[in-house]
Image: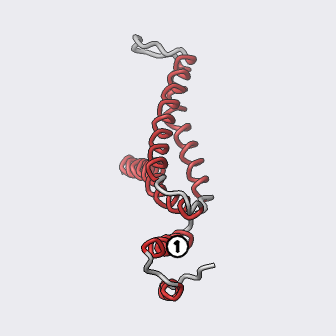
Amino acid sequence: NESRLLAYAVAVSSGLSVAASLLLPWSMLPDVVDDFRLANRNSKGHEAIFYSLYAFFTKFAAGISLGVSTLCLQFAGYDTGACRQPPPVVYTLKLLIGAAPVACITTGLMILVLYPISEDVRLRNKLALEELRMISEGSCDTEDWSNAAENSGINII
């Protein structure tokens, strides 16, 4: 029964770590693009740059982590043909599989706490982007914009 509880705890923590490392950054990216668009109103069409830079740095970080882990194992004395490895290799593997990912995910979650785009900022950005779209289409006057802001319940500063 204890092993089943341990398996559930490991499954939940694995799911949280996958969400923190893969799903959260992809879900944050559209908000970042919208925020950049509002901060740089004359700049258009940078979505592809954001997405490609995110994909590049994700692949780059994966390559760096593979290189670092290979170097750590080499320094620990890993022998590719041996069935039994020396104790430093076992210890290094424990660190690479256990402590290092936990430290990286915890650091990422701490950075996420400092993420500047809250739900209020996201809604404010959404309204401002709608205003930009209406202005670019030429179908918005200031009265329409103030009515849209009042109906949404958001105070625009």
The residue sitting at 42% across, 47% down in the picture is: 14
Judge by depth and name the residue closer to the eye, 50 or 88: 50
Q: Which residue is the extreme one toward the front? A: 138
Q: Against 124, is 109 above or below?
A: above
Which residue is tagged 1? Answer: 128
Task: Answer with the quarter of the image where residue 124 lies.
Answer: bottom right
Mark yes or no: residue 69 visible.
Answer: yes
Q: Against 27, is 103 above or below?
A: above
The residue sitting at 41% across, 11% down in the picture is: 82
Mark yes or no: residue 9 visible.
Answer: no
Picture coordinates of residue 75 (x, y %)? 57, 17
Instruction: Tell me the element at label 1.
Output: helix
**What's under tag 1, amino acid-wise?**
Ala
Q: How many discs appear?
A: 1
Q: Against 128, is 66 above or below?
A: above
The residue sitting at 58% across, 60% down in the picture is: 40
Picture coordinates of residue 23 (x, y %)? 42, 52
Picture coordinates of residue 36 (x, y %)? 55, 59
The residue sitting at 56% across, 67% down in the picture is: 118
Report the quarter where the C terminus lies: bottom right
Q: Which residue is the extreme one toward the top? A: 81
Q: How is the image coloured?
A: secondary structure
Q: Against 153, is 136 above or below?
A: above
Judge by depth and name the residue closer to the eye, 95 or 24: 24
Mark 1 crowd level (few <14, some 14–19, many ≥20, 10 Å Cα): some
